[in-house]
Image: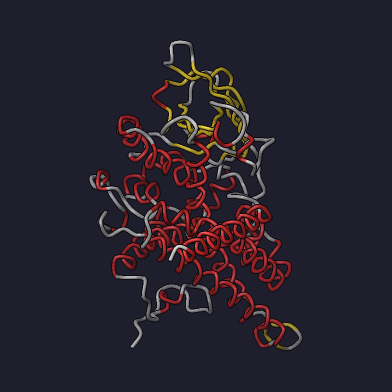
Amino acid sequence: MASSAYGSTLPWAEPSWYTGRPTPYYKESHKRLRDAVRQWCEEHIAPYTEEWVAAGAVPPSLYAACAKAGFLVPIASGKAIPKQWSNYPIIGGTKPEEWDGFHDFVLWDELMRGGSIASLFIGLVVGAPPLLKFASKQLQDKIFPEILSGEKRICLAVTEPAAGSDVRNITTTAEKTPDGKHYIVNGEKKWITNGMFSDYFMTAVRTGGAGAEGISMLLIPRSEGLRTRKIEVIAGPLSSTTYVTFEDVKVPAEYLVGQEGQGFRQTMVNFNHERLWIAFQAIRGCRIALNDAFQWAIKREAFDKTLIEQPVLRNKLGNCGRKVESLQAWTEQIVYELEHLSDAEGARILGGTTALLKVQAGMVCKYVAEECLKIMGGLGLTKTGQGARIEAFYRSVPSYVVPGGSEDVLIDLGVREALKLHRQAEKAKTKL
């Protein structure tokens, strides 16, 4: 017999396992995490979201509170928490050895339900992994205690005004001083999320010649010559999207992440988790919109019937539901596969698939947001009241479509990676 439902009982407003249906993926530790994150967000986030949006910023004190509550370590880790971080708190009392990719999914699902808090952590999500995977132990030992305690913050600085998705052609330079002790950095980065309040910038720089082989990753502390200015974006102010300028910024040579010339590969590996994480957020955004659209359709009357009694309206909702549940199932499949592959094999086998997943997440968001907005009518255009969350979701859709790579680029990448795997498999067959 199925256990009782958790959360909304409206169709497709929650993942199926939240409703009490059987699941092969989620265990008691996932349920504990879900409950803990939701309770914390309902107490510390939900009552203040409108106030923060109106002010254009989240109070800095909240980040320290999140560190104390145990959010930062799992957010920085992704699918596995390193043993050396076991002395830091983890939300939900989850043990480091228990943590997996489904905990990561649950964490973001509930953070997105919490609304504005999710934007606080984007820099950590994309900025910490290169430090964890590729940096020297000396650099990790210096930086991680600062960012995992909430004392300082980090972001990723790859995209440039002229390069966009074409990472191979970045132009920000890092030239070594004659004594070899420092790099001097010059250039510009754009659309850098969380840049306004970050202390460290995990930055793709050009240390060599043209193309991918000349790119390196350099951790740049906020210092003289590094300037930031806020960029207003369609989704709102809380992500603190930033234009970053480097003008003769002096960076210690030991802040190089890995070795020179490895930056492009490091960036591509990092993109895989970023794209999966975008899908996590997109799914919850769609479910919130469906929840509110259903609530409205059940009570709103038009032409002597409630909206939900109209077949055309049910058709809209049914199409939304099938798309969201398909996206959930594909996402869970990829999370499961990543759990059973090494990082290197996961990147090789699933890099193209993850790119296509991210594209599908954006397309589903566009469809669901538009259909739910039309169901709400004029309320869907209003930033307050019953349609407020749908209006906000509709406005945020480009945030799922554009970051992590544009649709056309990622679709092409998905096909090329699939063909590469095909050729490798055919070559292996001829050797048998």
Q: Taking 47 as reference, is 82 left or right?
A: left
The answer to which image quadrant residue 67 occupies is top left
The answer to which image quadrant residue 139 occupies is top left
In percent of width and height, residue 68 lies at 31, 45
Q: Taking 168 as reference, is 377 left or right?
A: right
Quarter that holds the N terminus = bottom left
Name of the residue lying farthest toward the front: 431
The answer to which image quadrant residue 327 occupies is bottom right
Q: In this view, does 225 lie above or below 272?
A: above
Q: Is residue 137 above or below residue 372?
A: above
Name of the residue lying farthest toward the left: 87
Q: Taking 10 as reference, is 71 left or right?
A: left
Which residue is more in the foreground, 174 or 59? 174
What color scheme is it? secondary structure
Name of the residue lying farthest toward the top: 178
In percent of width and height, residue 12 lies at 53, 76
In percent of width and height, residue 165 lies at 64, 44
Quarter that holds the C terminus = bottom left
Which residue is more in the foreground, 255 or 244? 255
Which residue is more in the foreground, 93 or 378? 93
Q: Residue at x 34, y 36 (%)?
A: 144
Label tally: 0
Which residue is more in the foreground, 101 or 195? 101
Q: Residue at x 35, y 85 (%)?
A: 2
In percent of width and height, residue 334 lies at 46, 64
Q: Residue at x 50, y 52 (%)?
A: 272
